[in-house]
Image (tube, grey):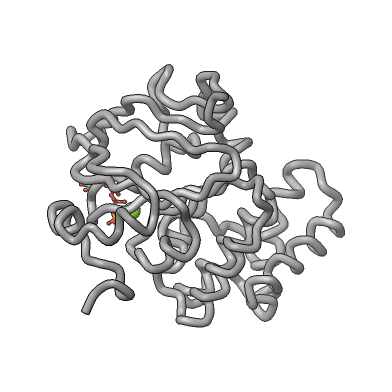
Amino acid sequence: MSPLLEVRALRYVYPDGHEALRGVSLSLGAGERVALVGANGSGKSTLLLHLAGALPAPENGVFLHGGPAGPERLRKSVGLIFQEPDDQLLMPQVLEDVAFGLVARGVPAKEARTRARAVLESLGAGRLAERPPHRLSGGEKRLAALAGILVMEPEVLVLDEPTAALDPRARRRVIELLRSMERETAVLLATHDLDMALDTCARAVILHEGRVAAEGALPGLFRDAELLERVGLELPLRYAR
Ligand SMILES: Nc1ncnc2c1ncn2[C@@H]1O[C@H](COP(=O)(O)OP(=O)(O)OP(=O)(O)O)[C@@H](O)[C@H]1O
Ligand SMILES: [Mg+2]
């Protein structure tokens, strides 16, 4: 069976000539949870932007259900939480912002708002519903952005550092939410929080300087101190002493 989402030998050079991806291949099965880790600048966000159709992948670079997928198709199936929530929050009120994608898809406004409120509440962020997004704290913005994607129930959920700036309780809520999500939702989680990756993912891919340096089952991969050292990472807290 072909994987749900696949990247084949993807290269990407930014307009200023910086080579961010140097031939990356990876695949994600239906319902699979995979962590994408790597030091700052290793190419994680660049890769995720391609998967969500926000940067144009070359033809035959990204595949969905075994067929080549262009940006438009990817935007429909892949929900991306950006690393910078400001790139995502556009409406004057959080509730409207979270409901925005549903309304754009044709869900009646009242139903969209009800669903948006329920997702905010599941993240412990119901109190933010009436606030203007640009006035929120960094962590609150992140929760609002997360709600706006979760409410769409995408086939593939792509998260770029979802717990950066979150307080410990909000981080724990995100982890619980990922664990409790429908098993059929595939998740690709880019994170520096290897402990969170261990709690939510069965497999990890390590990027290093725009290439896949290693991949494998968790927790095994994250116990390899030598490998982590080589790619500029540190042992997860639970294994470090
Ligand atoms: N718009 C851009 N123009 C030029 N180079 C860029 C641009 N965005 C990112 N890069 C470069 O591409 C490389 C990969 O960046 P990317 O943001 O994908 O890394 P990352 O793994 O997500 O890092 P982090 O952990 O810091 O989020 C970096 O060296 C970065 O400097
Ligand atoms: Mg990044």
Q: Position of residue 75 (x, y in %)?
A: 57, 36
Q: Nearer the viewer, residue 22 or 197?
A: 197
Residue 30's quadrant in the figure?
top right
Quadrant (top left/top right/bottom left/bottom right) for the C terminus: bottom left
Figure check: 156 above or below 175? above
Name the residue: 54% across, 45% down: 32
Q: Nearer the viewer, residue 240 or 96?
A: 240
User: Going by the image, does 201 lie left or right of 149?
Assistant: left
Q: Position of residue 214 (x, y in %)?
A: 26, 43
Quadrant (top left/top right/bottom left/bottom right) for the N terminus: top right
Q: Nearer the viewer, residue 187 or 29?
A: 29
Name the residue: 75% across, 68% down: 117
As drawn, which residue projects farthest toward the front? 220
Name the residue: 18% across, 37% down: 18
User: Going by the image, does 13 lie left or right of 106?
Assistant: left
Figure check: 124 above or below 114? below
Q: Position of residue 133 (x, y in %)?
A: 57, 69
Q: Position of residue 206 (x, y in %)?
A: 29, 48
Q: Nearer the viewer, residue 225 or 75?
A: 225
Name the residue: 20% across, 57% down: 228
Figure check: 208 above or below 98? above
Residue 25's quadrant in the figure?
top left
Figure check: 99 above or below 186? below
Marks counted in the figure total 0
